Image (cartoon, rainbow, N blue to C red):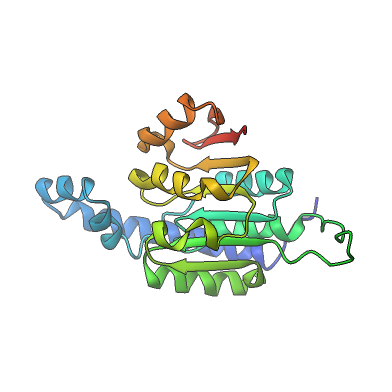
Amino acid sequence: MTTTLTSEPVAGLLRRLYEDARRSGEDFNRRMSELSASERAAMEHDSRAYYAAARTLYLAVSPETGRLLYTLVRARRARAVVEFGTSFGVSAISMAAALRDNPKPAAAADGREPGLPRLIGSEYEPSKAEAARASLAEAGLGDLVEVRVGDALETLAPDTLPAPVDLLFLDGAKDRYLDVLKLVEPALAPDALIVADNASRAPALLDHLRSSRDFLPVGGVQRDVEIALRSV
């Protein structure tokens, strides 16, 4: 099956980005090993300090999770996707490739053609957002994605999103997953998908998804990925 995700230029670009991610991870681990135990402990309790130190770290989803995101966006026939934590754009490329491949909906009753599908990403580190935009442009997907810079609790205000949002992907600071979900929730479609990477590090989110009648969680799918269906 030929898809945008598995064809050039996207496939080759992702291979290069994953190699860059491997090298950046090795460099980051070396720098972290040079910190004292107290410095590492302090960073574990201060997400902003951690992400400042990790400004060159890709924090990319795995290739398997990238394909999962592509599949979910395709299966949901999503037209609007929101991402918390764009980093260098690996996951955004996977999801934007699915937006490109999704069938175009029919024209409205008044004859108006539907607009382009949209992915809105939020990234706290400006240099990462700039790199993500460059990679999306190289992939030929830049017209589908807007990467906003700053605090996601400001950049993802629901009245600025292309509602209804069909899929929310959480991959930023884990202690803010629940806050971002609650912020975006008014813009979510009734049957929207919530996808969280590294979900075991976000216990407040998991408790909320598993105790609320508004969501039907699936549980860990692969490599600590949680999926939930909004059921209202």
Point out the image quarter for the C terminus: top right
Q: Position of residue 121 (x, y in %)?
A: 51, 61
Q: How many marks?
A: 0
The correct choice, above or below, for 195 with respect to 14 in the image is above
Residue at the spot x=12%, y=45% of the render?
37
Residue at the spot x=83%, y=56% of the render?
105
Residue at the spot x=70%, y=66% of the render?
8
Q: Does residue 65 appear to the left or right of 87 in the view shown?
A: right
The correct choice, above or below, for 92 with respect to 222 in the image is below
Q: Does residue 13 appear to the left or right of 223 in the view shown?
A: right
> In this rendering, does residue 6 appear at all?
no
Q: Does residue 33 appear to the left or right of 182 in the view shown?
A: left
> In this rendering, does residue 137 appear at all?
yes
Residue at the spot x=63%, y=47% of the render?
67
Front residue of 127/81: it is 81
Q: Residue furthest front?
A: 110
Q: Does residue 77 appear to the left or right of 29 in the view shown?
A: right
Front residue of 38/207: it is 207
Q: Position of residue 45 (x, y in %)?
A: 21, 45
Front residue of 196/115: it is 115
Front residue of 176/85: it is 176
Q: Position of residue 116 (x, y in %)?
A: 72, 66
Q: Position of residue 15 (x, y in %)?
A: 57, 60
